[in-house]
Image: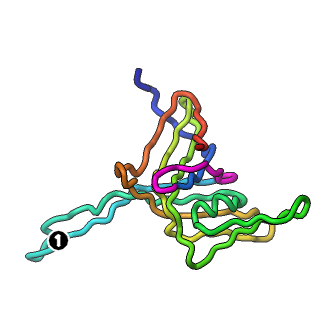
């Protein structure tokens, strides 16, 4: 029986960053205190001009531009989005976790899934399947303010089936699959 209720997504309940090995998803990493997950489908076009006019327009393939913002910082989420390494040392109460990024570290592909509750019941998910950070990693330490972590980039189609994104309406609220 098909869902007949029109989804009314409200708020942002959760965002997970899911590392990819090829196209195989790993374990989802929570974007702490997710504040925004915005996206817009975009496509670049090439025009053929001639005889003082436009003769043809051809799309170069759809993609999705996206931005994320969360409160606090998860070094694991930063590593999944920007590459680099995490090192841990020491024992409680003197443990140390260090995120390091080298100029030679490539930015990896990853999957992003966001969840909103739906005022019409259930929930609504947005899934971007093959994301890469193409913008800056940003954060700010400021007097009287929490650290906000931001990232932006582009999602392109998977190589296997060219799927870029899904919008998923669930009749019953369903948590984001955290993976293996």
Residue count near mark 1 (Cα–Cα under 10 Å), binned few <14, some 14–19, many ≥20: few
Task: Name the residue rendered at 45%, 31% in the picture.
Answer: 6
Q: What quarter of the picture does the C terminus occupy?
A: top right
Q: What is the quadrant of residue 97 in the picture?
A: bottom right
Where residue 108 sits: x, y (%)?
Answer: 52, 64
Q: What is the quadrant of residue 72 in the picture?
A: bottom right
Q: What quarter of the picture does the N terminus occupy?
A: top left
Relative horizontal placement of residue 137, taking residue 91 as reference (left or right): left
Where residue 102 sits: x, y (%)?
Answer: 61, 77
Where residue 163 sits: x, y (%)?
Answer: 38, 49
Task: Name the residue rendered at 85%, 65% in the picture.
Answer: 90
Q: Quick one: SS at disc 1?
A: strand
Task: Name the residue rendered at 91%, 60% in the picture.
Answer: 93
Q: Residue 63 or 93: which is nearer the viewer?
A: 93
Q: Residue 134 or 94: which is nearer the viewer?
A: 94
Residue 60 falls inside the magenta stretch: no
State which region is magenta. 21-34
- Determine which residue is flagged by label 1: 48
Q: Residue 157 or 48: which is nearer the viewer?
A: 157
Q: Residue furthest top?
A: 1
Residue 26 falls inside the magenta stretch: yes
Task: Name the residue rendered at 28%, 63% in the picture.
Answer: 60
How is this picture coloured? rainbow
Above or below, 168 against 162 in this view is: above
Relative horizontal placement of residue 118, taking residue 129 as reference (left or right): right
């Amino acid at each position: 029986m098909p869902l007949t209720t029109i989804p009314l997504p409200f708020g942002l309940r959760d965002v997970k960053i899911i590392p990819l090995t090829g196209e195989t998803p790993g374990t989802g990493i929570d974007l702490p205190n997710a504040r925004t997950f915005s996206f817009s489908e975009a496509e670049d076009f090439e025009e053929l001009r001639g005889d003082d006019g436009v003769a043809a327009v051809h799309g170069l393939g759809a993609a999705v531009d996206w931005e994320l913002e969360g409160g606090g910082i998860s070094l694991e989420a930063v590593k999944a989005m920007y590459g680099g390494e995490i090192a841990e040392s020491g024992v409680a109460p003197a443990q140390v976790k260090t995120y390091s990024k080298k100029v030679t570290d490539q930015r990896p592909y990853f999957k992003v899934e966001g969840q909103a509750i739906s005022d019409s019941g259930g929930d609504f998910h947005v899934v971007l399947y093959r994301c890469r950070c193409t913008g800056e990693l940003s954060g700010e330490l400021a007097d009287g303010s929490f650290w906000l972590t931001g990232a932006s980039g582009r999602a392109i189609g998977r190589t296997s089936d060219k799927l870029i994104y899904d919008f998923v309406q669930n009749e019953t609220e369903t948590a984001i699959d955290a993976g293996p």
